[in-house]
Image (cartoon, rainbow, N blue to C red):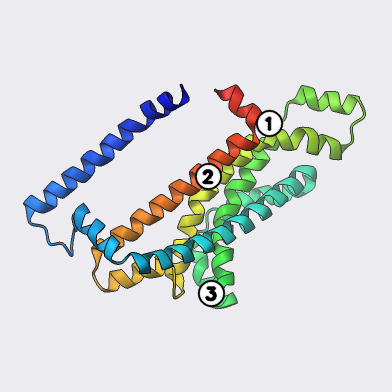
Amino acid sequence: MKQQRWFRAGWPPLVVVILLLLIWQLVVTWGGTASWLLPSPLKIWQDGTTDMPRVWMHTFATFRLMLIGFFVGVTVGVIVASCLHRVPVLKAGFYPLLILSQNVPTIALGPLLIILFGFGLLPKVILISLVCFFPVTMSTLDGFMQTDRSMYNYMQMIGASKRQIFYKLELPHALPALFTGLKISATYSVMGAVIAEWLGGGVGLGYYMILQKSAFRADREFVAIFIIVVLSLLFFWLIAGLEKWVIRWNAKRSS
C-alpha cells in the first residue's frame, strides 16, 4: 500500500519534468539557439559525463563543507533553543534579536567574515552555520511551546523536576518540530555552501560555477545546478528518513 501511494504521488511530477525536458530539447533543436547561450538537455548530459572527474571533485568538496556547516549550525541551534526555553529571561531578551537577524542577507555577511577570518575553511563554516542555525532554533522553540500542558501539569503534580520534565516530556514533544527545522536547514546548507564558495575558495561547486561563467560554458553551469538540486533532495530525504526512524510514534499517528 505504501509503495502504491508513493507511486501515485511521485509519477505526476516525474511526467511534468520529462515533458519540460522534451520541450526544452525541441525548442533548442528547432529554434536554432546557440549552444553556448542555451544548451539542450542532451548537450548538458554529454558535457557532464565528459567533465565528470572534475565535477565529482568539486561535488565532494561542497558535500564535505555543507556537512560540517550543517552539523555546527544544528548543534548550536538546538543548544540555544534549549537554553532560551529553560531560561525565560534569556528568551525575552534574545528572541527579538533572532528575528531581527534574519533581515541581514546571509550573502552580505560573507565579505565581512572573509575580512575577519581570511579565506580558509572557518568563514565558510560560519556562513553555512548561520544559514542552518535560524530554522532549527525557531522550529525547536515552537516545538517546546507545543508541549501538552495537561501532561506538563501532571508531571509537576507528581513532583518531577524541571530537568525531568524537559528530557522526558518537552524534548520528545519538540522532536517533530525539530526535524522540520532540520529538513529546511538540510536544503539551506547546500545553498550556503555554494554561496560560501562563490565568495572565496579554490574548490567546490560554487568555485566551479564561477570558472564556467568566465568561460561562457552554460552547459557546465547547468551541470552544477543539477548536482546542487540532487544534493539538496538527497539530504532532505535522508533527514526525512531519519525522522521516521527516530519518531516512530509520530509516523504511525500521521499514517
Mark 3 vs mark 2: in front: 2
* 238 shown above or below 196: above
Residue 170 in percent (x, y) is at 75, 35
Q: Amino acid at mark 3?
A: Ile
Q: Residues within 10 Å of mark 3 (few under 14, many from 20)?
A: some
Is 17 on the left-hand or right-hand side of 154?
Answer: left
Which residue is under mark 2? Answer: 238
* 88 shown above or below 145: below
Of all residues shown, which one is farthest toward the right? 159
Residue 139 sits in quarter: top right
Q: Is disc 3 in contact with disc 1, using a CB cutoff of under 8 Å?
A: no
Q: Amino acid at mark 1?
A: Gln
Q: Residues within 10 Å of mark 1 (few under 14, many from 20)?
A: few
Which residue is under mark 3? Answer: 114
Q: Secondary structure at mark 1?
A: loop
The C terminus lies in quadrant? top right
Which of disc 1 and disc 3 is earlier in sequence?
3
Which residue is under mark 1? Answer: 146
